[in-house]
Structures are given as C-alpha cells and as structure tokens.
Amino acid sequence: MHRYILTRVLHTIPLLGGISLLTFLLLQLTPGDFLNQMAENPGISPATIEAMRRNFGLDRPWYVQYGLYLRNLVLHFDFGESFSRHQPVFTVLREGLGNTLLLAVASAAVTWGLALPLGIWAAVRQHSWVDRLLSLVAFVWLSIPEILSGLLLLMLAARTGWFPVGGMRSLDFDELTAWGQFLDIAHHLALPALVVGLIPLASRMRQMRSNLLDVLRLDYVTTARAKGLDERVVVFKHALRNALNPMITLFGYTLGALVSGSFIAEIIFSWPGLGRITLDALLTQDQYLVMGSVLMASLVLILGNLVADILLAVADPRISYD
Amino acid sequence: MEPEAPPDSPWRIFRRQLRRSPLAIAGGVVLGLFYVLALFAPFLAPYPEDAMDRERYFHPPQSLRWVGPDGLHLRPFVYATTLTDAGGFVYDEDPSRPQPVRFFVRGSAYALLGILSTDVHLFGVDAPGRIYLFGTDAFGRDVLSRLLFGGQVSLTVGVVGILISFTLGLLLGGISGYVGGLTDTAIMRGTELLLSIPSLYLIIAMRNIIPIDLPSQQVYLGIVAILAFIGWASLARVIRGLVLTIRRSEFVTAAEALGYSRLRIIARHILPNTMSYVIVAATLSIPSYILGEVVLSFIGVGVQEPSASWGNMLNQARSIRALTSFPWLLYVPGAAIFLTVMAFNFLGDGLRDALDPRRTTGGRA
C-alpha cells in the first residue's frame, strides 16, 4: 500500500516535467519576443526587463533557457513576471487558484448534495414515475453545454435581480461584518457553482442509482429484509454503505475535473479564478502568465487523480496494488 | 428439405438494431437536415452573413403571418416596422404595410457549392423592405443568415477535427499496441501528458501560438488543428487496449506468417476490428469539438467577425443588456447548439446499442 502511494507520487514528477517542457515549447513558439513587448510598456522599468533577460537567459539557446526556467520554477517557485499586472506570476496565480478551488468545492457540494439523494430516491422507487422522470431529465441535461446553462442563469440573474450578475464581492464588501462578507461571497458564488455543479450531476445520479440497485439485489440485503428489519434500516444502514464505496473514487476524479470545468463559468460570471486569469493573459499576450496557469491547472488535475486513486485503495480493502 | 438460409450480414443486423431506436433515427435525421441547411446556406439565407442594416440594429424577430386585418392572404407576409424608440431599439409593426414573402428572389450574388454562380435566394421581400425572421444583431445583421453561414463553420469543425484526430489516434494507438516495447512506452507517456493538462487550458495555451489577427480561413484551420491535436490521446489509449487483445488472434498470426509488413497488418487486419468502437466514439466525441469552437469563438479568440460561427454569435449575447432586452441573440444560436449536441448524443447512443453484438436480442427476425 505504502509502496503503491510512493510509486504514484514519484510517477507525477516526470509527468510534471513533461508538462513544463510542453508549455515551455509552446512559449517558445509564440510569435514575437515578449520582452520587447514589455519594453514598450512604460509601466515596467528597464531594470526589471534586464533582470528577467538575465534570469531566464533569453539570449541563450532554448534548452539552456528551459533549464533556467525549470531552475527558477523548482528552486524559487518563480514563474516569471506578469507584465499586464506588474506582479510575479505566482502571486497572481495563488489568488486565482484559491478562488477556483472555492468554486470547485462549492460545485462539488451542489453535485453530490443533489446526486446522492436523487440517485437513492430513483433506486428505491425503481420503475416509478419519479425514476422515469429523473432519467429523462438526466438524458436531456447531458446535452446542455455549460456555456448555455451559464448564459441562461446569467439571464435569470439579470432579469430578476435575485443574484449578482458577476464578480465575487459587492462594492461595499469591506464595510460588511465577517458573517456579512461570507454571505456576500456565497451570494456571488451561487450561480457559478450551480453551472459547474450541474454538469456531472446527471451521470453521478445514474451511477448512484445503479450502484444501490446492484447492492439491493445481494443476498445479505435479502437476509436483512427476511429478519423483518424496517425497509429504511435495510436501505440506509445496510445497503447504502456498500453502494457509496465506488462513489468515493469518483469524488476524487471530479475534484480534478472541476478545475477544468469551472473555466467557462468563471468567464461568464467574471469569477476571478484561474480560468478568468488565463483568458485575460491570453488576450493581453501575457505569456508567462498563460504558461504558469496551464502548469498550475495541470498540477491540480494530477493531484486530484492521485488522491482519487489513493482514496480508492484506502476505501476498498479488496483492491490491492502490491 | 429447405436449405438453411445464410446468416445475416453484420450490416443487416446493424440496420435491424438501429430501427429499434427511434431516438437515434431522429438524431440522424436532424443532423442530416442541419448539414444540408449549412451546405445550401448562401441560397437559403436571405442576406450575406456580413450585410449590415444601419437602420435596424437589434431588430426583434418578425412573425410570419397569413391573416391580416383584410382577411386571409394567399402568400405569407411580415409587417414593415418603424423604429419608435431609438435608445431602446423598440420597433412597431405597421399593419397598413404588409410585405409579402416572395420566393426565388434576386439578391446578392454568390457561388452555390463553390461553382454555381447565381443571385437567386429562396425567399425575401421586395426592396426596400427587409425580412428578419430571427431578428438582427448589434450591427443590424440578419441572425437567420448568420445562423446558416455559422453552421458551415460550427458543424464542419467537429467532423474535420474528428477525421484528423481519429486517424492519429488509430495509427498511434495501433502501433503502440502492436509494436510494444519502447515505442509503446513513448506513445503512452505522450498521451498521459496530454491528458493531464485540463483541455481548455491546453487549448488556450496552443491558441496563444497562432496570431489573433489571421484571416478567418487560417484561424479556422488553426482551431481544427488544435482540437485534433488534443483529441487523439484518449482514443489512442483505448485503441491500444483493443489491439492488445486482437493481436493474439489467429488471423493476425496467419498474416504474420504470410510475411506482411507490420504497418499492413495494423492497418488492414487489426484496426478494422476496432471500427464499431471507433464509429460510436467518433459520433459521441463530435459535440466536444463543436463546443471547443463555440467556446473559443465565444471568448473572442476563435472565428473572427465578420465571419459567423455559432460561438461568436453567442458572444453577442454575453452582455446584460442583450440578455434582458434582445434575448433572441441567445435563444437562436443556443437552440442550434443544443439540438446539434443532443442529436449527436442520441445518434451515438443508438449506434452503440446497434453495433454492440452483446446487445443483439432475439436473433434473426
């Protein structure tokens, strides 16, 4: 078990190296020397540009440059300078990543808060109208892309005024109490979290339903029923535990996927997360910021999958990797 | 004794299975219709995609009528409108000025299917009147015309992208599974790399390479290339798995004994056996390519104005003003995208059921 975890962790190191090489090559292929572009910006001092040129060795061959990029990245956590924001890339990314993770956690709450009860409901009432209606809705919902559900919810917000139409904080945020600030952010978070959380909802609900149905057919459930136990006890105490097991893994994979999934919602609702930052960086040709955010997003995805694999191994004693 | 009938061909089994899923057939019919509409867009669209009407910005969709105050008309008509509130873009219909819809009218010149030069359009109204069945956008361009021309971009991105990425995925996955060894390791590490970068971030990073202000044909090719480059990895992994099973079959050993080249064995003997999986996977993957173009154009780095695509049409619906006052800018391209994605999903599900031999029920009918 420990060996498995260690192997998996070690395995991510060459993967991250490969991703950094790929992003670096993309950076090299980008037309135009970005430092020249920076030099045209009066907001950046020639000293900063000179320091970056030296630091990243931009007059040397590309493999030396890559080595320096990697060295700065690994030793100093230095992703370079964002020249549209006049800040180190890492500072910009840290804030964006925090906001994206907040959105991801809220979306996960939406997904699982709805998927588990609905899936259980559909399973215990198999073949009833509830079950049929839920599968029909799930089937249609699978075809509504995020970009459409996002714009429809934005339309709802704009027409009713029930929710803010974008951003993360109100203008008077600083004057609110701590509780008020929490509520304000939650208010801004609601719609983007709904958009992101509803994407995987349909398939998670179907998975929960079929897991529980499988377990309910097993002998030990029949035994529990034969003992004369209340049906609620049979379902919630005996069957549900085993039906939830496969869902634990999915939970981990979803967390990683949510970072990617929140991209469009962040743009539609101007949520200041990693996706929004990446798009702004692309539009302002802020090369180091683009590359830094790609690296950061990949890191989260890889870690999410890693955690999921380990969770699976921990949760299910039947699975052994040694 | 009657001689026993020969067993059904796979094609007949497939057709019989497909007939059992009406949703898949409906999906196929809708898609066929959409592709024909896109193909004949210049003929069906009353106006060119970039024709601006400077007197009718944000004109709401006109309703097609048969009945006026003077009773039933023999041909459908729309009422002419006048701008009553220039700030709020409010247009009032004028019941005294019905504009009959005429068919096969002369309009702007174009070349149908790229060869047939003509200026005949399916329908229109007498000049100087205008007909906007789906309204106009912020530049006074006809939304219906842009939807049809935009379909040419949005509907083909998926198919062209799939053709490229599935060719790559089949070849690399096939080689990886059949050859094994170092080649296998190298290809699989490559796919792992591509799959560990969140796809939208990778798309953005690659889009960064292409200058934003290229002509739209080149941007289109660039988008297809990016989507295809990202899409091959997951297919290659599955194909590799399938090939690992198939390569142990006797017919592969036989082909090897005959001394065929490895590439020939992969392409002619092994890969055809993965086709039913590939067809289903391709049908179910096309929506993600279409949505890739939609997202890129929506955020302003895809197909550039004045060329139309469903994504940059949605971009016009992004503002709060558009969402509250001019909702057709969202509904029209949104409905087209939704119907296309749903049709591909239905068709893909139906094909999966029809092509999967384990799901065949009841034997021969």
Image: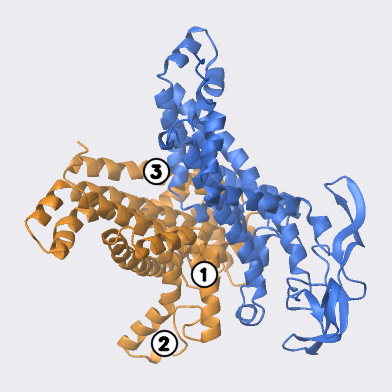
Alpha carbon distance from label 2 to label 1: 25 Å
Do the dots labelled 2 and 1 sit on one chain? yes
| Residue where numbered disc 1 is placed | A150
| Residue where numbered disc 3 is placed | A15
Note whether residue A170 is visible.
Answer: yes
Q: Nearer the viewer, residue A105 or B68?
A: B68
Do the dots labelled 3 and 1 sit on one chain? yes
B80 up-or-down from A56: above or below: below
Q: Could you say where residue B230 lies in the image, as x and y percent from the top left?
A: 54, 45
Give the SS element for disc 1.
helix
Apparent side of residue A222 relative to residue A95 in the rendered image (left or right): left
At 55% from the left edge and 14% from the top edge, which residue is drawn? B261
Confirm or deny contact between disc 2 and disc 1 (CB under 8 A).
Answer: no
In the image, what residue type sits under mark 1?
A: Gly
Toward the top, the furthest residue is: B258
At 62% from the left edge and 44% from the top edge, which residue is drawn? B161
Report the disc number at residue B71: none
Q: Of the two numbered discs 3 and 2 on the same chain, state the one appearing first in sequence.
A: 3
Note whether residue A35 is visible.
Answer: no
